[in-house]
Image (cartoon, grey):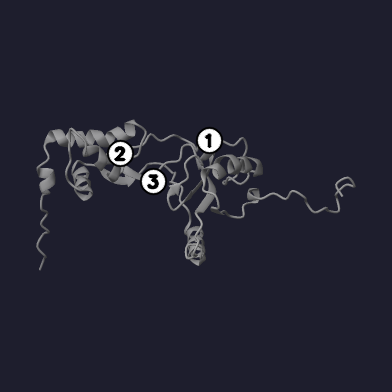
């Protein structure tokens, strides 16, 4: 005995939306790609809430509408993925933050976390909203493009204003940024961009990257000259 077919109720929200508003929503979504941006449901909701659409429904209703309009959230036809931290790196960091008793102190100090990362110029997301034939989507470029180093700091209130440093290194061929980052640019950023923009007495949390510290007086070795000794 076969089960009865599942009844699919038409969405009253899509039914009440005329062709003009449907076309406006479609144009707003495609407009993200024309501006070189990636559309998200939250960003699209802010756009359609403005005139002339004046969309009054919630986020889930807009999601049903763009699906009814023929858009699909599927994989971009490229071999590149967005950069994400690995779980084996995120988990120890969370455990370390739980063990810190700074917040439980009677006189807590503002916490400032800093780190560096890198990104290629042509990096792209893995999935996005597109039409069934895949013609609507981000403008992908071949190759990874130039590499940029990003240095920033932040705390519980978000990123620190004026502390962003992003530059294109002159060298660096490895799949990392440590060979392109050294002590001098980090020292200049630390003194000129970080310290002036944080509160006095802040607790700065950083890892043990080799360019985060520098030995001013190195221990002599067997190959050291007399003037060095």
Q: In this rendering, does residue 146 appear at all? A: yes
Seen at 46% across and 46% down, the residue is 159
Pick the front one: 111 or 220 = 111
Residue wearing tag 1: 146
Residue 26 image position (x, y, % from top left): 22, 36
For disc 1, the neighbor class at 10 Å (few under 14, some 14 to 19, many from 20) is few
Pick the front one: 134 or 212 = 212
In contact (CB < 8 Å): disc 3 and disc 1 = no
Pick the front one: 61 or 144 = 61
Seen at 47% across and 41% down, the residue is 161
Seen at 65% across and 44% down, the residue is 183
Q: In this rendering, does residue 173 appear at all? A: no
Residue 148 image position (x, y, % from top left): 53, 38
For disc 3, the neighbor class at 10 Å (few under 14, some 14 to 19, many from 20) is some
Residue 194 image position (x, y, % from top left): 55, 44
**SS at circle 1:** loop
Q: Which mark is residue 126?
A: 3
Number of callouts: 3
Question: The N terminus lies in which quarter of the figure?
Answer: bottom left
For disc 2, the neighbor class at 10 Å (few under 14, some 14 to 19, many from 20) is some
Residue 4 image position (x, y, % from top left): 9, 62
Left or right of 217, for residue 144:
left
Residue lying at the far bottom of the rendered structure:
1
> How many angstroms separate mark 3 from mark 1 (CA)?
20 Å
Q: Which mark is residue 134?
A: 2
Pick the front one: 202 or 124 = 202
């Amino acid at each position: 005995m076969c089960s009865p077919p599942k009844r699919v109720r038409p969405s009253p929200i899509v039914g009440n939306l005329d062709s003009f508003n449907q076309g406006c929503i479609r144009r707003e979504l495609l407009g993200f790609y024309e501006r070189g941006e990636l559309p998200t449901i939250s960003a699209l909701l802010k756009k359609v809430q403005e005139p002339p659409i004046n969309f009054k429904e919630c986020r889930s209703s807009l999601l049903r509408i763009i699906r009814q309009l023929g858009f699909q959230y599927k994989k971009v036809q490229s071999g590149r993925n967005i950069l994400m931290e690995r779980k084996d790196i995120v988990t120890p960091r969370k455990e370390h933050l739980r063990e810190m008793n700074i917040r439980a102190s009677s006189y807590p100090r503002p916490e400032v976390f800093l780190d560096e990362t890198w990104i290629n110029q042509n990096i792209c997301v893995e999935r996005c909203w597109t039409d069934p034939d895949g013609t609507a989507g981000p403008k992908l470029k071949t190759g990874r493009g130039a590499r940029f180093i990003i240095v920033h700091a932040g705390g519980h209130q978000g990123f620190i204003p004026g502390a962003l440093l992003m530059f294109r290194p002159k060298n660096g061929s490895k799949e990392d940024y440590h060979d392109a980052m050294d002590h001098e640019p980090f020292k200049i950023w630390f003194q000129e961009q970080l310290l002036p923009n944080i509160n006095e007495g802040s607790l700065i949390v950083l890892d043990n990257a080799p360019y985060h510290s520098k030995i001013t007086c190195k221990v002599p070795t067997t190959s050291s000259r007399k003037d060095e000794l």
